[in-house]
Image (cartoon, rainbow, N blue to C red):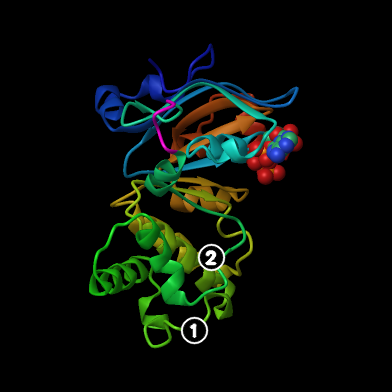
Amino acid sequence: MSEVSGAIRTADEFEPNKATAMENTKISADKVQVYYGDTHAIKDVSINIRAQTVTAFIGPSGCGKSTFLRCLNRMNDTIDICRVEGRIAIDDEDIYDPKVDPVQLRAKVGMVFQKPNPFPKSIYDNVSYGPRIHGLVRRKSELDDIVASSLQKAGLWEEVKDRLDSPGTGLSGGQQQRLCIARAIAVSPEVILMDEPCSALDPIATAKVEELIDELRENYTIVIVTHSMQQAARVSQRTAFFHLGNLVEVGDTQDIFTNPRDKRTQDYITGRFG
Ligand SMILES: Nc1ncnc2c1ncn2[C@@H]1O[C@H](COP(=O)(O)OP(=O)(O)OP(=O)(O)O)[C@@H](O)[C@H]1O
């Protein structure tokens, strides 16, 4: 099986270590269709997403990047008119199987949104909330440890360790976004989905979050939707290009940007549309 189904050639068809790449699959989507009422937003998308890799979803506005991202932790379940067909598996387990609890799934597959959205609570409570509701800790000292280590992993500890009781909403935008990343990390996810996580941040805060994404890759599978091709080039190892609900091609980021196989990808990356 190639990484993208259908007649379109993919960079992976030329990959010498294909078997190794397949073994490394964390998420596999097969013939996924998404409808909002009568609108067919995602058309027959198949893709394998690799573990401990940053995969960027790029494409013009409205092409379905966010819709497909939200399929990966069933966030679309919360939209009444949205219907998802096909199969999406994480570690070969179908996440749309009726026995899968979407709340547990969303702990395993965390999400960071475009606009930082800390709870109107303290920094400590923002990070400890998930582990408490998921029953991951028994003692306050364990919770303290999770809060500290999550903030450390999110690169925020040094900036907030003396004011854990202050409101999360009082932090700068970039700090709030790293707090949201700490909150996602606190429940020990395996996958982190990021929907344009830097679009509300200034260049310095963006650089910090990008650096963090690079560090997190060692322990997590990361999928990021971005409008910035520079960002995709900086942070991702794999890039998937979407157009009008289709996944046009996926491959190593460097190949997609230097040697796209489809004219639509080429037109997009050279700024001819979108
Ligand atoms: N909640 C919704 N209800 C109805 N239609 C929706 C909804 N969300 C998205 N759509 C439609 O689905 C299609 C894909 O939208 P989506 O937001 O996934 O694209 P996108 O590539 O992420 O766009 P952008 O880059 O502008 O964020 C669009 O036609 C959009 O209008």
Q: Earlier in the sequence, mark 2 or mark 1?
A: 1
Give the extent of the magenta segment.
97-101
Q: Principal SS element in the magenta part?
A: loop
**Which one is nearer the viewer's eye here, 95 or 207?**
95
Q: Quadrant of ligand 1?
A: top right
**Which one is nearer the viewer's eye here, 203 or 195?**
195
- Residue drawn at x 51%, y 34% is 240
- The answer to whether mark 2 and mark 1 are in CB contact below 8 A is no
Image position, residue 202 (x, y; %): 61, 70
- Residue drawn at x 53%, y 11% is 7
**In the image, 127: left or right of 64?**
left
Where the N terminus falls, by quadrant?
top left
Residue 23 vs 160, above or below: the answer is above
Is disc 2 placed on a helix, strand or loop? Answer: helix
98 in magenta: yes
**Crowdedness of circle 1 by 10 Å Cα count: few (<14), some, many (20+)?**
some
Image position, residue 235 (x, y; %): 45, 52
- Residue drawn at x 53%, y 25% is 261
- Write down the quadrant of residue 94 in the picture: top left
Question: Which amino acid, by three-letter code, is at mark 2?
Answer: Thr
Residue 51 vs 147, above or below: the answer is above
**In the image, 248: left or right of 81?**
left
Question: Which amino acid, by three-letter code, is at mark 1?
Answer: Ser
Q: Give the label on residue 206, or none.
A: 2
125 in magenta: no
Q: Which tag is nearer the camera, tag 2 or tag 1?
A: 1
Q: Give the label on residue 166, or none.
A: 1
CA gap, disc 2 and disc 1: 23 Å
**In the image, 179: left or right of 60?**
left
- Write down the quadrant of residue 128 in the picture: bottom left
